[in-house]
Image (cartoon, rainbow, N blue to C red):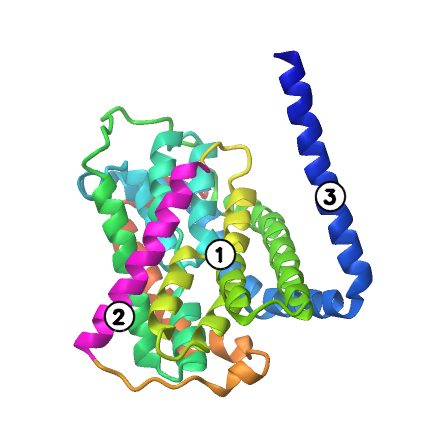
Amino acid sequence: MFVKIVYKNRWRTAIALSILITAAATVLTFPAAVAGGISRGLSICSSVIIPSLFPFLVLSGVIVRSGIATAIGNRLDRLTRRVFGLPGCCAGGILIGFFGGYPAGAVAIGELVRSGQLSKTDAKHMLRFCVNGGPGFVISAVGATIMNSTAFGWMLFAAHLVSSLIIGIIGAPCRKTSNRSRRSMPSVSFTVSLVESVTAACQTLLSLCGFVVLFAAILTVADACGIPSHLSLLLSCLLEVNCGCLAAAEITQAAPFLLGCTIGFGGLCVHCQLAAALHGTGVMSPSFFLSRIAHALLTGLLTVWLLQLFPLSLSVGSSLNAPLNLQTSYGGVTVSVALLILCGVWMLILSPALDKGQDGRYNIS
């Protein structure tokens, strides 16, 4: 037994050492490509990741720490249990997961697990359908900018969310949810929860941006190595969702299906971001990756089906021949409307449930 363990460790060490040597040789061989990839990754972080995710990361932290998640849960417990087989405290996280962009839902799940309001079993089920592209990316960047059709962006976003709902609902009847309420996180004042949430959001963003820069550099080096076009397409779709959507749009006839699959899967870069956000919780599992594959296929098929019901004239944008101007893509009206709708829903839910006391804390009725 000891000999087997030693050999396993030697093989792992040899594989890790080979990867490191290959990476070092690649950096020395293609320094310009690595620098260009890092520059592209930093551009994506400054124009996409930070502006689109930071508000939702702060919002998810405030919701959990201030006791708002408990208030939402008290009012929506029966609905979330019947539809998704999850306790009511997940309602706010589900909304964030649907409209906040890929890592935002995982951050909310991590906050709920660490605060003791959500079990690991429930968190694993929630993670299967609460990892989605935000409306700013799907509608504005992919639909309007890449495919020159905002209507197609809405269609793609609808297929994306319907696929998430199907995965969440299918898993609900197979789960036995306990009526026993889990430990609630002691609520703090809004000011304290805001400060703590901003600090946690900055730490999370640092790790998220690190993965974006890394995978952007890998893809740029892969292009510099001159790999075949079909392999480059597969690699882009599997590794990084932004580059994957740009590559998928070049395949004109299959673009709707490939774009749906790419957005549904999310890319290994997003998966690494989720692992960083959920570090120490034990929520990531093999079932998550199976759900991503199912989500990818469902989104692709639903997108094609919707296009058959509502035919659109699609054309690839000129952005494919130049770097995508993500600042204009994410700064449109779509994001603002989505944020306003999300805030309005929360205000309607919470207005009769929260009462701010003289000490500045929110008392949950």
Percent of width and height locating residue 322: 58, 83
What is the three-letter code of the residue carrying label 3? Ser
Can residue 292 be found in the magenta stretch?
A: yes
C-alpha separation, residue under disc 1 versus residue under disc 3 = 24 Å
Q: Regarding mark 3 in the picture, which secondary structure is present there?
A: helix
Q: Regarding mark 2 in the picture, which secondary structure is present there?
A: helix
Q: Please indicate, yes or no, whether residue 75 appears anywhere in the rendered image.
A: no
Name the disc covering residue 267, or none: 1
Q: Image quadrant for the N terminus?
A: top right
Percent of width and height locating residue 298: 28, 57
* Disc 2: which residue: 304
Q: Residue at x 75, y 40 (%)?
A: 17
What is the three-letter code of the residue carrying label 1? Gly
* Disc 3: which residue: 18
Q: Are circles 1 and 2 on residues that touch, CB within 8 Å?
A: no
Label 3 vs 2, first from the N-terminus: 3
Q: Residues within 10 Å of mark 2 (few under 14, many from 20)?
A: many
Q: Residues within 10 Å of mark 1 (few under 14, many from 20)?
A: many
